Amino acid sequence: MELRVVGCHGGETPKHRTSGFVLRSGAHMIAIDAGCLTSGLTLAEQSRLEAVLVSHGHMDHLRDLATLADNRCQNNAPPLVIASCKQTITILKKHFFNGLLWPDFAKIPSEKHPTISYQVLEPEKVTEIAGFEVQAIMVSHTIDSCAFLVRKKGGKGGAVAYSGDTGPTDRLWEVLNEAKDLRAMLMEVSFPNEQQKLATVSGHHTPETLGRELLKLDRRRDVPMLLYHIKPTFERTVERELGKIKNGCELAVLRLGEEFDI
């Protein structure tokens, strides 16, 4: 399973892109979150995507679903599966692809041949999506938000976890402690320690809370922590504070364009 970093920041500038990751396994290709998929993928790559796992209903994680659907419609691509928890699918239908803010591509070009289709994920139930096995685990944010645990179909090879937007939480780590094949985790951290109040009220991590949170993972010395969602304004400060975490974890701040074999 190959992981490509299309976007990994908690904000946008000419040098920063919001959350978007691509997983490949053989002929299958899916994305996790859609903050930057059309700005970071070619038209051919956009059309190859079979599904997008959306962690929650905030714009920096779903924004490019709009232009992705538009491009795929023009290129006669197969329907794109958009998978998430029930509240996020409701948000997309009511407030995003609603025929007002953006066309309802679940009915375009026609209801029989739509550009997108929705799939509601039942929390913690293993669901097969486009050659992958996916578990959605609810985490702690300002709205319903889920992490994902993803494996190749059939459970072959290792698993990768994606935290989504979250502050301190418990159930995610309980599930991950049962995942003996966990090979890597994409983990959010957003604000510096001095902005702890803002991080708490917005449902995010600082290096201080992240360091404590990672102690909940039994195999933290064996599972690389690939960090994303740092706010561009605080990038240098957060990276400096991350360097002071001494809990046995292997921490790496993600960069645009990086690729990993998991």
Image: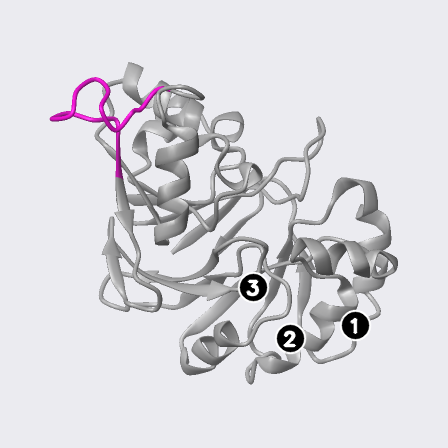
Is label 2 in a helix, a strand or a loop?
helix
Q: Residue at x 84, y 69 (%)?
A: 244
Amino acid marked by disc 3: Ser
Which of pointers 1 and 3 indicates the residue nearer the eye? 3
Q: Are marks 3 and 2 in contact (CB under 8 Å)?
A: no
Q: Which residues are magenta?
A: 103-117
| Residue assigned mark 2 | 214
Which secondary structure is most common in the magenta stretch? Answer: loop
What amino acid is at disc 2? Leu
Q: Quadrant of the N terminus?
A: bottom left
Q: Earlier in the sequence, mark 1 or mark 3?
A: 3
Quadrant in the picture for residue 50: top left
Q: Residue furthest top?
A: 74
Q: In the image, is residue 106 part of the stretch drawn in magenta?
A: yes
Contact flag, marks 1 and 3 (Cβ < 8 Å): no
Task: Report helix, strand or loop for mark 1.
Answer: loop
